[in-house]
Amino acid sequence: AAPSAGSTTAKAKTSSSGDAVSLVFDKDDYTVLTTTITTGSGDHSVTYHFYKAVTYVAKPVDAAYQSLNLSVPVEIDGTAVDVSHAPIMLANIMGGYSSSSTNAATGVGYTGPIIGGPGGGAGGGAGGGNGAGEGATARQNNALYALANGWVVVEPGVRGRDNVAADGTYYGKAPACIVDLKAAVRYLRHNKHRIPGNTDWIVSGGGSAGAALSSLLGASGDSPLYHSYLKEIGAADESDAVFATTAYSPITDLDHADMAYEWMFGTLPLASGATAAEPYSTQLKDAYTGYLRSLHLRGVKGFGTLTADNYADYMVKAYLQPSATAYLTALSDADRTTYLTANPFITWSGGKATFTWDGFLSHIGHRSKNAPSFDALDVSAFENQEFGDATTNARHFTLYSLRTATGDDTAQLDADLPEKIRLMNPMHFIGQRNPGRSRHWWLRTGALDTNTSHNIVLNLAAKLDNLGDDVNSSLYWDGGHAVNEDADAMIAWINHLTG
Ligand code: DHB
């Protein structure tokens, strides 16, 4: 497919004869920027080398997306920093399964980079010019905190569900986004002697759909299932495994997300006051029981086998009450009293918060998506578009929605879809105990998030924990979608692992 017009200011050095773009990183092609970044330890003046829109594949379909920005700190608070062995924060800038470009001006939303914007250095992000979108907080915090802590920061763009060529064909449908992200990792490794930082310590991160992508990158490291796709775009022949994976409200496990959503939010009304569409809500909720059983999960912190019947108790005890307790402990006595008065579903005793599942659900109040949420019956969801193909913008990707929408109980998904669905689901690779996966996982979501159910990220955490991986998972009390409230702790965790 030919790239759409007007989208190629990236430095894709494709010659008119169609020669491949060089995969050799030009370490001298940077600008020097200085910015102030505020982290938990205060304001930091950071001077860094900024490399803009570096194309990371030899045969780009559209270099406007298949390019990355790289930021290398050289001086922090007046002291020179040595980044030769620093971790590399790979903060993908994807949201909504849309294409994300290193060329997007800051201010256009969350599919643009955080650092080095036209507003002057990191001010594009930190100054609030960017970050309007849902996945922005997680990326913004991790990219900026990493830079201020002397890490190298890479912000790769990727193709997405919206990319359409001049001839009307789509060129960014699944699995393009993960193929591109893997290609970016391979590019870094290919240039490990030219790019500062330690490619053995790549830390992936993202928010929302970007968190889904980050989880998938971590889970599917070095899987041969992507090889033909990587070859097609001229990705470097290197490992695409990453050391650690961070994910904030991952919108993932898409082929089971409708069931999980009804399991968790099925009793809640929409913001309009309307109830979710039936019989879909009840049917999907009932189907979740079998899916959960098939996962054979044991809960973290010594919980036994997780089932649809004990999962609410698990979520309350292992995640929600500890999260509320931490939140309330940090408040002043007066603020805590005010909070508890406004939220009588919480019992505060002996320095601990307790409450029931139903009390917690009433605190959330309403669901934000109708049923089915992700494979919408009218194929109107982002996810329907993600699973489109070159000539179809949006398709069903679950038998439930396909058969319900068509009224045909024997209807089958398009033949290419089962594999693409697998290539987009980290649970598949974790279930296969993929040996190339990350072994360190930082998983978060906000307790009030209703973009997807909490089970999605907590199932991921349990499955990885059950394999013996190092999993740090928690919920931010009263946090929303894709927030990141402990970037300092994430940085400290990695610094400890790599120190
Ligand atoms: C995003 C949010 C969603 O609710 C969703 O279904 C997919 C992606 C996002 O913000 O990236």
Image (tube, grey):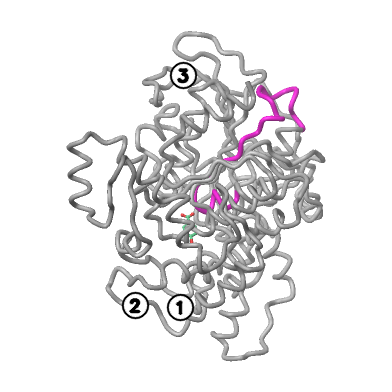
**Residue named by callout 1:** 281
**Residue named by callout 3:** 46
Q: Quadrant of the N terminus?
A: bottom right
In this view, the residue in front, 29 or 112, is 112
In 3D space, how far apart are the residues under numbered discs 2 and 1 (Cα atoms)?
A: 9 Å
| Image quadrant in which you'd find residue 495 | top right
Residue shown at 66% from the left, 86% from the top: 411
Q: Where is residue 168 in the image (x, y as percent from the top left)?
A: 61, 67
In 3D space, how far apart are the residues under numbered discs 1 and 3 (Cα atoms)?
A: 51 Å
**Residue named by callout 2:** 275
Q: Is residue 449 covered in magenta?
A: no
Disc 2 to disc 1: CB gap under 8 Å: yes
Front disc: 3 or 2: 2
Q: Which amino acid does label 2 sit on?
A: Thr
> CB of residue at label 1: within 8 Å of ligand 1?
no
Q: Judge whether 180 appears above or below 173 on screen.
A: above
Q: Which amino acid does label 1 sit on?
A: Ser
Q: In this view, does 359 lie to the left or right of 6?
A: left
Where does the magenta region start and end?
190-213
Front disc: 1 or 3: 1
Q: In this view, does 341 lie to the left or right of 23?
A: left
